[in-house]
Amino acid sequence: RKEVEQDPGPFNVPEGATVAFNCTYSNSASQSFFWYRQDCRKEPKLLMSVYSSGNEDGRFTAQLNRASQYISLLIRDSKLSDSATYLCVVKAPSNYQLIWGAGTKLIIKP
Amino acid sequence: EAGVAQSPRYKIIEKRQSVAFWCNPISGHATLYWYQQILGQGPKLLIQFQNNGVVDDSQLPKDRFSAERLKGVDSTLKIQPAKLEDSAVYLCASSATGTGARDTQYFGPGTRLTVL
């Protein structure tokens, strides 16, 4: 089993729709979780951290379910500019290194 | 504040040739990381430096890859000789401390290597 698993997609979604991504992680001791966004041929950029109580940043909502060991990202009112690959990242509790999922590709269509 | 700088942005070489990549982290960041990202995958950590010391190089193919951060600031990653499977984007990242839940890694634009 991979340490961090994501649905690779692609998700083809019409503009204005709501889309959700899920991610599962294997180490139950993990404490820090993130979503990164990576545009085509660009570097990954931190989109948001994921907090235990769930957190929101504009149209983006991240949630953590520790019991099931999954993390989710919800994008509301999707824009064309949201088209990118979304990477789920877990920080290893032992050495603070980042463990990356393979990413989910999102394509927003007009 | 200047971000992480990398050069070159693109490199095309033939197999068995050598190549070197350079990274300049964000000023004051103690920790520097080199990642390899193959198309369709997440980044894979190759080596982590804390100042000028190696913290983890367990996934660095040491028979062909080497890296150094001699003065604890900028770093170079070298591949010698290159193989076809080394075609990837090489990302450099830096963070302030390398420890703690809130320590954030910032990435450079990457070097896209194509080995023919």
Image (spheres, rainbow, N blue to C red):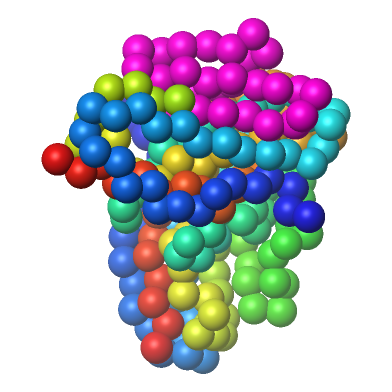
Residue at (76, 23) in percent of width and height: A66
Q: Quadrant of the C terminus of chain B?
A: bottom left
Residue at (44, 57) in percent of width and height: B22
Location of residue A62 with respect to B7 vertically, above or below: above
Location of residue B50 with respect to B76 vertically, above or below: above
Res B108 quadrant in image: top left
User: Viewed as shown, does residue B54 lie left or right of A103?
Assistant: right
**x and y percentages locating residue B38 in the rendered image:** 50, 65
User: Viewed as shown, does residue A3 lie left or right of B22?
Assistant: right
Res A110 quadrant in image: top left
Q: Find the residue positioned furthest to the left.
A: A110
- Front position in the image: B89 or B65: B89
Residue at (41, 13) in percent of width and height: A57
Examine the rendering and report whether any part of residue A46 can be seen: no
Location of residue B18 with respect to A79 vertically, above or below: below
Location of residue B100 with respect to A14 vertically, above or below: above
**x and y percentages locating residue A47 in the rendered image:** 44, 27
- Front position in the image: B67 or A43: A43
Q: Which residues are magenta?
A: A44-73
Q: Any magenta on residue A68?
A: yes
- Front position in the image: B106 or B52: B106
**x and y percentages locating residue B103 in the rendered image:** 62, 24
Q: Any magenta on residue A50?
A: yes
Examine the rendering and report whether any part of residue A35 can be seen: yes
Residue at (77, 29) in percent of width and height: A68
Q: Main secondary structure of the magenta part?
A: strand
Give the total of numbered labels.
0
**x and y percentages locating residue A109 in the rendered image:** 20, 44
Q: Quadrant of the N terminus of chain B?
A: top left
